[in-house]
Structure formats: structure tokens, C-alpha cells
């Protein structure tokens, strides 16, 4: 059976079904499959860039680099008082 025939067969099953449970399960399955097959933007990065990003995240999580959210807000409030942030 071709892809087009499979699609038509699936559509026919959906159209003819009155079973809400079937439709709900099929919808959940299709959404999960779509998420599973979605590409991750990081897959398209060059390996050396991805490595640097991972290292930066690890450094920030370990407190080795970075600025806290509160510190950034305080600096923004000082530099841009008209923004009311």
C-alpha cells in the first residue's frame, strides 16, 4: 500500500469513527510522534559551538561564571530607570 493510500485509509477510519477514545488516543499518538521526530536546533550547530555552549551552561550551573537574575535586573533598573522594571 502506498503512502497516499495509507493516508486515505487513516482519514477514512477517523471520519467514520464515533469513538471519542479512539480519536483522543490517535491525536495524542500523532502529537507525540511529531514531537519525537522534530529536529532539535542544536543538531544543526557545528560540534565546536555546541561544545562551547554545553561548557558555558555547566560553568554557569556550577557558579563559575555568570550574573544572577537579580543582579541583572538591578543593573537594568540603574541604567534604564524609565523602563520601570
Image: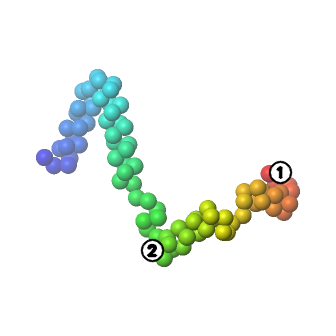
Check disc 2 and report the residue beneath it: 47
**Viewed as shown, does residue 13 lie left or right of 65?**
left
> Residue 34 placed where, x, y %?
36, 48
Q: Separation of disc 2 and disc 1 at Cα? A: 41 Å
Q: Which quadrant holds residue 67?
A: bottom right
Residue 6 position in % (x across, y down): 19, 43
Q: Quadrant of residue 75?
A: bottom right
Identify which residue, 10 or 53, lies in the foreground. Answer: 53
* Secondary structure beneath label 1: loop
Q: Nearer the viewer, residue 41 or 74?
A: 74
Where is residue 31? Give x, y as percent: 38, 43
Where is residue 9 shown, x and y percent of the image? 20, 38
Identify the residue position indicated by label 1 in the image. 84
- Taking the spot 33% from the left edge, 25% from the top edge, the residue there is 20
Residue at (37%, 44%) from the top-left corner?
32
Q: Is residue 44 above or below residue 31?
A: below
- Which residue sits furthest front? 62
Towards the viewer: 58 or 20:
58
Amino acid at each position: 500500500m502506498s503512502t497516499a493510500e495509507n493516508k486515505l485509509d487513516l482519514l477514512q477510519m477517523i471520519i467514520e469513527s464515533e469513538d471519542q477514545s479512539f480519536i483522543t488516543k490517535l491525536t495524542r499518538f500523532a502529537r507525540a510522534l511529531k514531537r519525537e521526530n522534530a529536529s532539535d536546533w542544536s543538531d544543526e550547530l557545528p560540534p565546536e559551538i555546541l561544545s562551547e555552549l554545553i561548557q558555558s551552561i555547566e560553568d554557569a550551573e556550577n557558579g563559575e561564571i555568570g550574573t544572577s537574575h537579580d543582579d541583572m535586573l538591578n543593573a537594568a533598573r540603574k541604567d534604564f530607570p524609565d523602563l520601570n522594571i
